[in-house]
Image (tube, coloured by chain):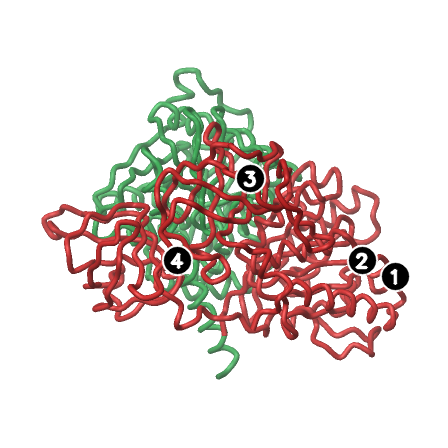
Chain colours: A green, B red
Amino acid sequence: MTTLEAATDAAKDNLAALESEAIHIFREVAGEFDRPVILFSGGKDSTLLLHLAIKAFWPAPVPFPLLHVDTGHNFEEVLEFRDGVVDRHGLRLVVAKVQDWIDDGRLTERPDGTRNPLQTTPLLDTIAEQKYDAVFGGGRRDEERARAKERIFSLRNAFGQWEPRRQRPELWNLYNGRHRPGEHVRVFPLSNWTEADVWNYIARERIELPSIYYAHRRKVYRRDGMWLTEGPWGGPRADEEVKELTVRYRTVGDGSCTGAVESTASTVEDVIAEVQASRLTERGATRADDRLSEAAMEDRKREGYF
Amino acid sequence: MSSLLRLATAGSVDDGKSTLVGRLLYDTKSVLADQLDAVQRASVDRGLSTPDLSLLVDGLRSEREQGITIDVAYRYFATPRRSFVLADTPGHVQYTRNTVTGASTAQLAVLLVDARNGVVEQTRRHAAVLALLGVPRLVLAVNKIDLLDYDEAGFAVIAKEFAAHAASLGYPEGTVLTVPVSALHGDNVATHSANTPWYSGPTLLDHLETVPVAPDPHDAPFRLPVQYVIRPRTAEYPDYRGYAGQISSGTVRPGDEVVVLPQGSRSTVERVDTHGGPLAEAGAGGSVTVVLADDLDISRGDLIAGVANRPTVTDELGAVLCWLSGTPLRPGARLLVKHGARTVQAIVEELTSRFDEQSLSTVESPDTLELNEIGGVRLRLAEEIPVDDYARSPRTGAFLVIEPKDGDTLAAGMVGDRFSALGEPAA
């Protein structure tokens, strides 16, 4: 067997093990909790999450609704994709719009215009209001140092806060979902997946994604070392030159802080090759909010962010 | 050969675990430029002349402030031969609970010692914990070998002492490797070191890539804890009733006779379903949905098992606990036991023993079990559950002990007398 074949076989087994683990986690939550919800943005991780949920409960429908915290700075292509998926699978979608919180004064627009950090309040308010007790997220431990520390079942207190020193030990495949009224548990079925696993699985399962993950022509401008696209987040400014480039997105988030990368990768296979060759992590390449400080993610998670 | 190896690290404070993990990530090119840039910037900020690879893994604010690892971190790296999930566990005595967390799913553990100190109390304790949890293979990484001037004789003394300790814990020859490394300089981590010409064994990475992972034995009895009952009640599937769960051990095929426990009703497997289509056979680790020939009353928490080699159905449990809570355990305590998909109330009837990692012996009838202590208990349960001995069937022999008031996980539980297994090398 050649090395390449061996590597491909290895990847297949690995994906089967990861898939089985994620399905086990979904079923465990369905069995233990009263009101779970899946956080769904239309990005690749949450699309993968939904795909696994469908597998876990087939031939029955997914027994949870979806929740999208909409910053108002979304890519049109992603919102269309989100609504298409919801229709196709007959799911229920709850949308918490950051704009509603700004309009009634519960949130104030930040001077830099970015709304990514503003998501935490609508998320926590909606969790409390809807009495969700388990909230699935597509977070992966390979994304970031603080995430590497997170359990698959991650208890949040009544304020939605994560307390890393007080995490419960997670033993074997036995997950402890106990929580007191007001507390909830964040659940991360993709914890043990890497970016490469995600793309290999998307290829294997032929999972459809928003078009912006693949190379396309786009008018962009340079800010903070990233290629941003024109949008309601205040750009380009007068001094920012607009160029038309062939780009794609590695992550999909708030448009004000999610940058495109120059790329000609137009198929899943191209993307896999590009990810393998890349010397930058997906967040390092395209997420401004993680650059704020050495422990930016940890600090936001302590406040209740994912 | 399995393509995914789950491993855990263990060792005492300041012996360089985080640096070794950083080195493994670095040498397998699992560190990308922006992560390395961040480490370089942080190292310069701290006045260091070379990048501190431990900063790659110590992610929490307080860890970076104190320069120690506080909580288990999971790391991912891959080579063309294998993918790895690494649980990087802290060495402080007060965080032994995290060693248990990291090791409960590990197929191999890498223990570190500082070459200048050799095997210390914490090494012996960790090795004993790993043996009790049934981690099948150990590697002792004798780190900072450069500070011992790459001394062969010094290394040999440590290797011999550890081999003897591992053997006394029941590790047969061939399941333990001792390797001289310098995590700081990379000696024998991913490449053979010119500084240790006397060492002819594999590098640490070679070993991790090629070590055989024992497959689930073919004759292991079939066990499927029922997690969730799938009843679509849709036009397309009006009468579908499937029992969903992850197979703990053994295999299942259509036509197999099974028993549902604890109630004891019997049936035949009609289909093994997945979203991708029905399977001719499914084995341990697979998340499947089983459809039975008879309409039985089965719910979450029940266990579907093969008719031969059934588990024991009991409401009296003899077990070993790794006590992970700061509140000591006392006889009479009312707790919850989570076993498979079932949670039952339990009362601690008796503390039968406490394990002493140093002498590898047990103390009879202790008054309490304190944080990080390991001991034997007798539990009375509010209802009968089907259990296996942990030594034979770890997934159906393991359980959590939970505090009913706040839901905290108090202990890792293992059914049976684990202590008797120590000291008898496995076949």
Q: Mark 4 points at which residue?
A: A19
In the rendered image of this protein, does residue B141 appear above or below residue A154?
Answer: below
Query: Which residue matches tag 3?
Result: A240
Amino acid, disc 3: Glu
The answer to whether mark 3 and mark 1 are in CB contact below 8 A is no
Q: Are marks 2 and 1 in contact (CB under 8 Å)?
A: yes
Q: Residue B114 carries which label?
A: 2
Name the one closer to the observer, A257 or A130: A130
In the rendered image, the vertical position of residue B408 relative to residue A11, given as above or below: above
Q: Do the residues labelled 1 and 4 touch (CB within 8 Å)?
A: no
Observer-side mark, 2 or 4, equals: 2
Amino acid under disc 1: Leu
Eyeballing the image, is B354 above or below B289? above
Label 2 vs label 1, nearer the camera: 2
Q: Which mark sits nearer the N-terminus, 2 or 1?
A: 2
Residues tagged 3 and 4 counted as in contact (Cβ below 8 A): no
Residue to which mark 1 is pinned: B147
Instruction: Give the spatial CA distance, label 3 vs label 1.
Output: 55 Å
Q: Mark 4 lies on which chain?
A: A
Callouts 2 and 3 in the same chain? no
Label 3 – label 4 distance at C-alpha? 44 Å
Looking at the picture, do discs 1 and 4 lie on one chain?
no
